[in-house]
Image (cartoon, rainbow, N blue to C red):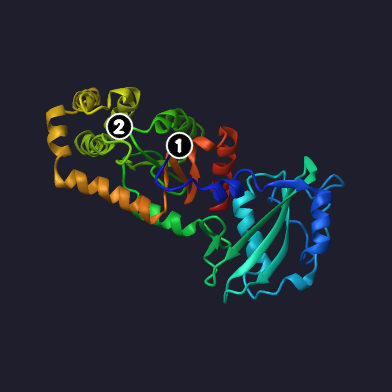
């Protein structure tokens, strides 16, 4: 996984593995000496059955720990439903929403567990900004009942790279990738599986060349822009497949030949593609994709947005990724 900044460990923890597990007995003991929160039903995914006798025994909650005016428990639950609702085995309970010494900043404490492993309960804590739009833990993330809507709107309007799949952007998948990134090459079969499993998805490829570590990536991206301009979307994806296949040849000595060969295989005049790749127009298109990534705080490749929900593409087991796509598609109807 290639990074622009440190990996989103909190995002991974919250979306994929929930929280660090602790024994329920230990968690209950901590609750005797630490603030607890209000009583409420444990929310689950809409299609999930009600908790059974095997459900986790969350410790009692104390209404006195809900001292902050915002966010509300309903908003926190809605946010967690957006993060975790794809997994019907996961249950949680909001334990506290408390004021902090920073005006308007609230501290949220949540307990979570899996129904299939109710003996282990995890604890998650994060801070919510005064505007209610972001949470802070080890990093800043979007927050709210619909945390991914803002990114989704940006992508629907500005993700203009080569595309394939359905014409409608109702289910929008956007990959940010670097042609010289080995992990991006590894991710391409996963993209192909997603497109086969979700023919209703509109897929967009956006360039994110990490030039500090991949000196030929920007040139490969510019060539790709020109192949798409000269030959269309199908030509671009043929070009991309060839470049990833021959990625080891993206060296200062061999890159020009490799990219020309890929353009030719895509059915495009290689000389025209090369001339175009040196143009301000081509560089402007690559820079626009870079700026889009910066606006969305994309900090590694390959990165996939599913209706605005960002995930590190190679870090998610395919069956989990598929569940998340299904969940987002249903949630965003």
Q: Is residue 274 visible?
A: yes
Tell me if 198 is positioned left or right of 38 in this view. Answer: left
Q: Is residue 48 visible?
A: no
Please state if 116 lies on the left or on the right of 143 as rendered.
right
Give 277 or 159, whichever is nearer the viewer: 277
Q: Which mark is residue 305?
A: none
Q: Are marks 1 and 2 in contact (CB under 8 Å)?
A: no
Relative to 206, say whether 76 is above or below.
below
The answer to whether 261 is drawn above or below residue 144 in the figure is: above
In percent of width and height, residue 5 lies at 42, 48
Residue 194 placement (x, y as % from top left)? 49, 34
Q: Residue at x 17, y 47 (%)?
A: 281
Judged from the image, the secondary structure of the residue bearing numbered disc 2 is: helix
Q: Quadrant of the N terminus?
A: top left
Query: Viewed as shown, does residue 288 lie left or right of 84?
Result: left
What residue is rendered at 17% in x and 38% in y?
277
Residue 162's image quarter?
top left
Residue 165 or 309: which is nearer the viewer?
Answer: 309
Q: Badge 2: few (under 14), some or many (20 or more) residues near its Cα, within 10 Å?
A: some
* Residue wearing tag 2: 234
Q: Position of residue 230 (x, y in %)?
A: 19, 35
Foreground disc of the pair 1, 2: 1
The correct choice, above or below, for 253 with respect to 53 in the image is: above
Q: Which mark is residue 1?
A: 1
Within 10 angstroms of label 1, few (less than 14), some, or many (20 or more) residues?
some
């Amino acid at each position: 996984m290639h990074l622009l900044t440190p990996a989103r460990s909190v995002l991974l923890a919250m979306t994929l593995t929930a929280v660090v597990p602790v024994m329920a007995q230990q968690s209950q003991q901590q609750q005797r000496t630490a603030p607890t929160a209000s009583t409420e039903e444990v929310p689950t995914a809409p299609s999930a059955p009600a908790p059974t006798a095997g459900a986790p025994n969350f410790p009692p909650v104390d209404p006195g720990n809900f001292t902050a005016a915002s966010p509300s428990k309903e908003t926190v639950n809605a946010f967690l439903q957006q993060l975790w609702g794809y997994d019907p085995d996961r249950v949680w309970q909001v334990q506290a929403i408390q004021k902090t010494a920073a005006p308007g900043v609230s501290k949220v404490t949540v307990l979570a567990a899996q129904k299939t492993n109710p003996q282990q309960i995890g604890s998650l804590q994060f801070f919510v900004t005064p505007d209610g739009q972001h949470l802070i833990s080890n990093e800043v993330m979007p927050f709210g009942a619909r945390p991914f809507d803002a990114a989704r709107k940006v992508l629907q309007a500005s993700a203009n790279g080569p595309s394939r799949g359905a014409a409608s952007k109702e289910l929008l998948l956007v990959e940010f990738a670097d042609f010289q990134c080995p992990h991006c090459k590894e991710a391409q079969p996963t993209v192909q599986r997603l497109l086969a499993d979700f023919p209703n998805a509109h897929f967009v490829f956006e360039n994110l060349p990490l030039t500090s570590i991949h000196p030929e990536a920007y040139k490969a991206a510019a060539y790709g822009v020109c192949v798409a301009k000269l030959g269309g979307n199908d030509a671009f994806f043929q070009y991309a497949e060839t470049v990833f296949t021959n990625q080891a040849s993206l060296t200062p000595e061999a890159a020009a030949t490799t990219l020309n060969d890929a353009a030719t295989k895509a059915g495009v005049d290689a000389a025209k593609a090369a001339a175009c790749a040196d143009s301000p127009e081509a560089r402007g298109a690559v820079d626009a994709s870079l700026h889009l990534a910066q606006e969305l705080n994309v900090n590694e490749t390959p990165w996939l947005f599913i209706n605005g929900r960002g995930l590190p593409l190679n870090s998610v087991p395919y069956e989990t990724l598929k569940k998340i796509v299904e969940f987002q598609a249903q949630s965003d109807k």
